[in-house]
Image (spheres, grey):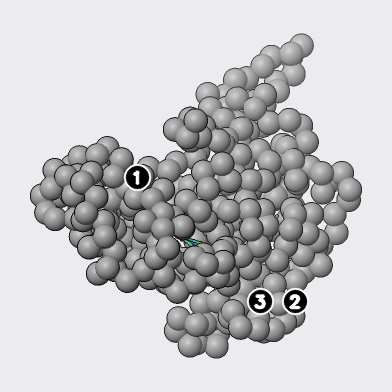
Amino acid sequence: MRYTIYLGGVILIPLFLCQYKKSKNRDVEKTTAISSDDLMVSEKIALGRALFFDSRLSINNEVSCASCHIPELAFTDGKKVSIGVAGRTTQRNSPSLLNAALLPTVMFDGHLPTLEQQVIVPIQEHVEMDMNMLELIKKLRKVDRYQKAAKQIFNREFDAWVLTRAISAYERSLVSNNSPFDRYCNQKEQGALTESQKNGWKLFSEKLYCTQCHAAPNFTNFEAINNGMYNDFGNDKGRFRIFNDSTDIGKFKVPSLRNIVLTAPYMHDGSLHSLDDVINHYVAGGSSHINKDIRIVPFSLSENERTDLKNFLSSLTDTSYMIDYK
Ligand code: HEC
Ligand code: HEC
């Protein structure tokens, strides 16, 4: 609701609190949120949650999904790149799983169409959980609780179908959309943001070009883009490794900036330690790679503006999901 305030004959119309274009990718049909059967959702989530935290999913019983997707860190792991079984290092930085239900494609390469398909990847990946799927199913069928739940919820033996459906149901339940920014925008709570955060939002959305790719309300356009990280992407060329198309070199899926203060270090390879490093990257306009998006151009920023921008980014934190992890 908007109020018109009369003050000594002068009409003041308070500014719209915040306005953003609805991202085209938000329609539910286009996201992985669709599920063919939504029966017994809470039971599926409970089973998926148990599996997500179960290190028996890895070959040496040491690594679970939650080893690299830690609830307190918005389901990231705080490391530059993730560490799997026997201390093996992956090539990439662990992304947040909050609001995963909204992802039209999964992974930094933006190539997997569903969360269900993704589950199989870390389980079988040599440097992550290094488990053979057939062996894993044999192992987990021996767990009474899992067998019983599979029969009760899916009316079948515990198998890869049950495993992937249950974990994906759990991932879809991970929601974070009640940050101070959301309260300011959606509930029109003026006091939810400080003046500095409001200035930061104005910078982010109007003066700089950040919303072109990190569009509200999800703070991503979900596209794979080259944001000028390197002149030479070395042995991780991003989406190029999937389709071998040279125009894909250096393209990585734009990450959501929700809970960004919890998810350092940043970028696909965790090479930027802090938000200051990230801001320095954009101020400088990135590399001169041929695929660099034309919207990445140098700009200048005063010290006050930098503070406002960082304060705005911190207004995207919502840890109310943590209530389930006390
Ligand atoms: C060894 C650490 C590690 C383990 C174990 C692990 N992940 Fe990940 N996860 C990562 C990394 C690193 C990425 C980024 C990979 C990429 O995009 O190429 C990732 C990406 C993802 C994504 C894609 C998110 C997005 O924004 O596109 C999902 C979903 C996910 N993991 C879920 C899981 C599930 C479910 C499990 C357990 C079955 C799991 N992960 C186990 C490290 C790990
Ligand atoms: C042309 C698209 C584009 C624009 C414009 C853009 N970004 Fe990004 N941003 C990306 C991509 C792509 C990545 C991921 C790159 C990677 O993983 O190597 C990213 C990553 C980030 C990250 C790290 C996220 C994480 O979880 O690792 C932050 C923070 C960020 N951008 C902030 C900003 C800010 C602030 C602006 C405005 C000054 C901005 N971005 C403008 C495309 C863009």
On residue 163, which mark appears?
A: none
Most extreme residue toward the right is 303
Q: Secondary structure at mark 1?
A: helix
Residue found at x 27% / y 37%: 42
Residue found at x 78% / y 36%: 196
Q: Which residue is labeled 1 in the image?
A: 50
Which of label 3 and label 1 is nearer to you? 1
Where is residue 45? Give x, y as percent. Answer: 31, 43
Residues at discs 1 and 2 in contact (Cβ within 8 Å): no
Residue found at x 23% / y 44%: 145
On residue 287, which mark appears?
A: 2
Residues packed near mark 3 inside 10 Å, few (<14), some (14 to 19) or many (20 plus)? many
Circle nearer the N terminus (3, 1): 1
Alpha carbon separation for disc pair 2 and 3: 7 Å
Q: Amino acid at mark 3?
A: Lys
Residue nearest the observer in this picture, 42 or 282: 42
Q: Amino acid at mark 1?
A: Ala
